[in-house]
Amino acid sequence: RVRAGDLLTYPVHFQNVPTASAPAQEVVLEDPLDASLALSTLRVVAIGWGDESLLPPADSPAFRLRTEVPDSRPGNAKPWRVDVSSEVSGADRLRLRFRTIDPATGELPDDPLAGFLPPDAATGRGQGWISLSVRTKPGLATGTRITNAATIVFDTEAPITTNEVFHTIGLPGDVNDDGVVNPGDVFYLVAFLYSGGPAPLGVADVNLDAKTDALDLFYLINHLFAGGPAPL
């Protein structure tokens, strides 16, 4: 469970499988964002593949980055450029493109065995990833379900859809996720904190300090039994 206004992180992983016949020259990821996410807060926070990693800008989801990588074949000393672009298309769709560039032509390599993402091996050389962060919109109703799934296209292959993940807006203080905040949530939190009980099912960080600890327990007790402020 998450709150309205919480920051969510979505990692997206992709792989050029070990049985692939050639490196991928171009990979395109598209992520249609749920209507309950605040697009103005969207950022790409990590990009990488194999041994390479790039640092996206912190102030915008739209950018262009460039790096140079060696050919993956032993004995081939020619370097290749990799251009990574990110843009928001339409009202809600993030699109990232990884593109191998021949420095001599400024285009995709003519060599079909050249590409930034070779078939995977034990080193992880054929694996790539991105990570997104975005906040849920304020004022969302308890029970609102927020889903996310991306599509990935390798060169001219058919799109691959990632597994869907979801978050649900919870009621702050409803530690056991039964729809109400009551003494049962205090008992549940005591068991978790001091007796090795199960992790909270609902929103347990009632004082909004980004962790669940004894201060949340005291806050909840104060709210329920001493007229203290409601969970944040």
Image (cartoon, grey):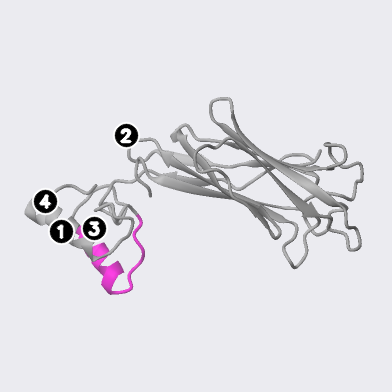
Q: Position of residue 4 (x, y in %)?
A: 35, 40
Q: Position of residue 210 (x, y in %)?
A: 33, 55
Distance Cα–Cα, label 4 vs label 3: 16 Å
Instruction: Name the amino acid, label 2.
Output: Gly
The secondary structure type at the circle numbered 3 is: helix
Distance Cα–Cα, label 4 vs label 1: 8 Å
Q: Nearer the viewer, mark 3 or mark 2?
A: 2
Say if the magenta span includes residue 200.
Answer: yes
Instruction: Name the amino acid, label 1.
Output: Ile
The residue at the far top in this view is: 90
Which range of residues does the magenta coloring cover?
183-201
Say which residue appears at 32% left-offset and 70% top-offset.
197
The secondary structure type at the circle numbered 2 is: loop
Instruction: Name the amino acid, label 3.
Output: Asp
Point out the tag, 4 or 1, that comes first from the N-terminus.
1
Q: Nearer the viewer, mark 1 or mark 3?
A: 1
Which numbered tag is attached to residue 27? none
Distance Cα–Cα, label 1 vs label 3: 10 Å
User: Disc 1 marks which residue?
Assistant: 221
